[in-house]
Image (cartoon, rainbow, N blue to C red):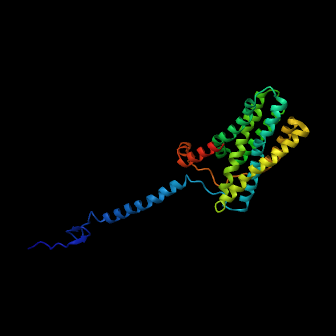
Amino acid sequence: SDSTPSTHVSHGACSCTDEMEKCDHQDVPSAMTNSALHTEAAPEDQLEKNSAHLPAELTPADSGYAWVIVICAAFNLMCTLGVVNSFGVFSTYYINYIYPSVSAASIAWVGTTMSLFMLGGAIATGPLTDRFGFRLVSLAGTVICCVALLLASFTSALWQLVLTQGIMFGIGAACIFSPSVSLPAQWHEKRRPLATGIAVAGSGAGGMIFTVATQNMMDTIGHKWTLRALALILLCVSGTAGMFYKRRVSVPRGGISLGAIARDPRLIAVGMAGFMVN
C-alpha cells in the first residue's frame, strides 16, 4: 500500500518498470537500421568492386576516328593477306626455275608455315596487344615482315626460304593480322558488322591486287627484286596504317583468363569451323 505505483513505458517488444530507468533495448531499432544499411550497401560495394575490373572507355564508340581504324585495318589486311595469297605465284616460279629438282610438296612448306604461324600466332599476339598496345605490335609485325622478305631475296637454299619467307614472315603477319581483325569491332557498336566486313574485305582486295602485281614484277624484275619491292610496299602501307592504331577501351585490371576463353563453347565452334575452312 505504501509502494509507489510503477509507470510502465513500452519500447516496442520490451516493457520497463521505471520511467527514469533506461531500457537496454532502446538501441535495438538503431542496430537493426544500421544492419539494414550495411545490407543495402553491400551490393553497391560489390558492384564497385566488380566494375573496377571492367575495361574503361577511353574514347566514345562510333566516332569519326572509328572509321579511320577501319580503313587502316583494311590496308593492313590487304598487304598481309595479299602477300600470303600471292605465294602461289612464287611457288610456280620456284618449281619451274629456281628448284626444279625439288618436289612441289617440299616447296609447299614455305606457304604452309607462313599460314600456320600467321593464324596460330594470334594466341601470342592477343596478350602482346594487352601489354604493349595495338600500335607497337602492328608496327613490330611490319618490321618483321619486311626483314623476312628482304632476307628471303638473298637465300640460296629451300630451307632458308622456309625460315624467312615462311616462318619469319608468318610471325610478323600474325602481329598485323590479329590486331587488324579485332580492333574495328572495339571501335564500333552500332555498325560493328559493317565495320568488320569492310576491314576484312581488304584481305580479298589484297589477294587480287598483290597476285597480279607479283606476277607482273616476277616477269620483269625477277623473284629477288619482287621480294624486295613487296617489302618496300609493306613498309610504306602497313607502317603508315599501323601508326593510327590505338585502343578504345582499357585493358581489364584483373587480366583475361585464357583458360576460361579456351573453354567457351562459342570459341571452340568458331575455331573448329575456321580450322576446317582453312
- Point 87% across, 43% down: residue: 216
Q: Is residue 273 above or below residue 5?
A: above
Query: Where is 171 relative to 41, above or below?
Result: above
Report the residue that reaches farthest toward the left: 1
Instruction: Report the side of 154 relative to 187 (left or right).
Output: right
274 lies left or right of 91:
left
Q: Quadrant of residue 107?
A: top right
Q: Is residue 28 visible?
A: yes
Viewer-proximal residue, 79 or 247?
79
Is residue 133 in view?
no
- Which one is nearer the viewer's eye here, 192 or 243? 192
Measured as percent of width and height from the top left, residue 268 is found at 56, 45
The quarter holding residue 259 reads top right
Q: How many numbered marks, from 0 up?
A: 0
**Residue 14 percent coordinates (x, y):** 23, 67
Task: Name the residue at the right extreme.
Answer: 220
* Residue 1 vertical position relative to residue 152 in the rendered view, above or below: below
Left or right of residue 48: residue 84: right
Frontmost residue, 7 versus 199: 199
Counting from the top left corner in percent of width and height, residue 205 is at 77, 51
The quarter of the rendered structure image containing the C terminus is top right
**Residue in front for this viewpoint, 150 or 203:** 203
Residue 47 on image: x %, y %: 49, 57
The quadrant of the image that shows the N terminus is bottom left
Residue at x 66% of width, y 61% of height:
191
Q: Is residue 26 left or right of residue 100?
A: left
* Residue shown at the point (81%, 46%) measured from the top left: 210
The residue under the point 77% across, 35% down is 165
Q: Quadrant of residue 80?
A: top right
**Relative height, residue 209 to residue 152 (above, below):** below
